[in-house]
Amino acid sequence: MNTAPHTQLRIPAQGRFLPLVQGHVRDLARAVGLPDRDVLALELAAEEAFENICAHAYPDGTPGDVLVDGELLEGELRLAFRDEGLPFDPALLERRAARPVSETTGLGLKLIHSAVDEVRWVNRGRQGKALCLVKRLPLAEPAPENAAASPTHSVAEMSPPAEDRTARAPEQIYTIRPLEPEDALHVARLFWLTYGYSYKSETFYRPEGLLDMVARGVLVSHVAVTRDGEVAGHAGLLRPEPVPMAEGGLLAIAPEHRGRQLMERLMASLAEHAKALGLVGLAFNAVTSHAVSQRSVIRQGARPCGLDLAGSPPRLFKNMRLGDAPPQRESCLHCFAYLASPAPALAHVPQRHRAMVERLYAALGRQLTLPPSAQGVSTGEPGAYSVAFDRGLAKGVVRVAQADGRQWPEIRRAATDLMDIAGAEVVHIDLPLAQAATPGLWELAEAAGFFFAGVWPHAAEDGDLLRLTRLAAPLDMAQVRLYSDPALELGAYVQAEMARAAAALR
């Protein structure tokens, strides 16, 4: 008698074990040959199911387990998420799932329903309860007539790169509009199709995280939609600080819809939105592991002005062959594009950096005032700064809002702690160029091993930011690929400053 393959994972109902649940479901989905889109959707459904059990099945920290059962039947994959926690009413949950998706309580359930073909809620009495999901498998392609003479190949051998095997979508009219709640899962899938899991922020693989950023005003998200309502592309504006600029990008285009000018249309729509918000310009951070995205943003009018070195862990981008060089932390070329003629800039800069800063502003097409460097390191105003650490990126930032050289011992201690205690592989000090005390802090930081990395226009509350960087992980500048002569000039200058900083620490 043939028995269907069966798997089971027992795991504590604690959020820290979520990656194990996702990995188990992902491996099952791949074992039955589901396409990558469906694999990602099942992972998201597993996340929703597991986190719901963790949050509601065992109240007040009561210990308990979750059992994830997998059954591989002919033509379908069945998953069951079981627990022995609080009883529940399946009819109540179904009513919640039927509510409008804008209601947060029903979003997770709708994501689960959209990922599978069948959802059942089962009460098992003393044995607890289960959420049962059924995913039907795609039909196998009919064998060719000469199949007997055809050699056999594994799936890996038969699968060319994604850009080669993707069928082109029919030519059609696309609608560009703001993201709606029901688009979020499709956007998460787009990010996987475009980047795999290499994108720097995992928020964009989590529909609820994406919607939360939109609701908080941190993200403006626009999508390109087909005539059938399919989300074919996404782009967004990030604005985590109340400053008159935003970071543009967050671009993902479905492979079958590429080559249709969707990127240009999405960014044009976002630029109009940015103008309506009163923003003066948009920044773009283009990766330096290849020149494709740099070329794109520079051709759209953005100008290089900074290098965000070693800003995220090493990543291998989907469908890009980047050579045989060993992976290193990813760097970005910071570019800026004005939406209207900019007002003159004020920048307090040490004498030896003035020529480079003047060239950067000339390339930006912005008039610059460089007052004489202030004597001393303080203007008498009390200093203010903040410290942030991103554990996922292993990156620390000390952001100075009010420059005061008297606070340098505190700032230096914070930077040291970010590397020695928190484990940051790169630390930035961002200084406000419009303030007279900045050159004093700048020189103190350089004596401590930080080096000039560029200018971030309109990133400070009162003007532009200077970025100083110190690396705790090795970085081979020969692997930093830069597009355009201004970017190459900036890269050479930053590399020389990096060498100076390293010598200062010896």
Image (cartoon, rainbow, N blue to C red):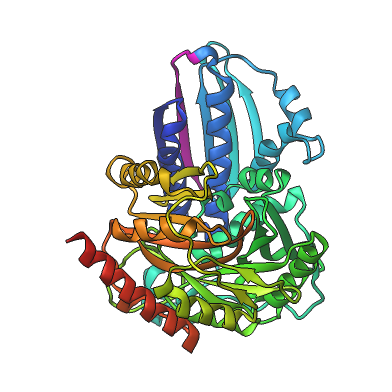
Place residue 119 in its image quadrant.
top right
Question: Residue 391, can we see it?
Answer: no
How far from the left and from the top, in percent, is residue 167?
Answer: 62, 77
Q: Is residue 34 above or below residue 321?
A: above
| Front-lying residue, 240 or 280 | 280
- Residue in view at x 40 percent, y 33 percent: 9
Q: Give the residue furthest to the left.
A: 506
Is 350 included in the stretch rendered in magenta?
Answer: no
> Over which residues does the magenta segment extend?
61-73
How far from the left and from the top, in percent, is residue 225?
Answer: 77, 65
Q: Give the residue furthest to the front.
A: 375
Place residue 361 in its image quadrant.
bottom right
Specify the quadrant that holds the C terminus: bottom left
Q: Is residue 475 above or below residue 114?
A: below
Question: Residue 387, can we see it?
Answer: yes
Q: Give the residue furthest to the bottom.
A: 485
How far from the left and from the top, in percent, is residue 128?
Answer: 54, 17
- Residue in view at x 75 percent, y 69 percent: 271
Specify the quadrant that holds the N terminus: top left
Q: Is residue 419 above or below residue 366?
A: above
Q: Main secondary structure of the magenta part?
A: strand
Q: Is residue 180 above or below residue 282?
A: above
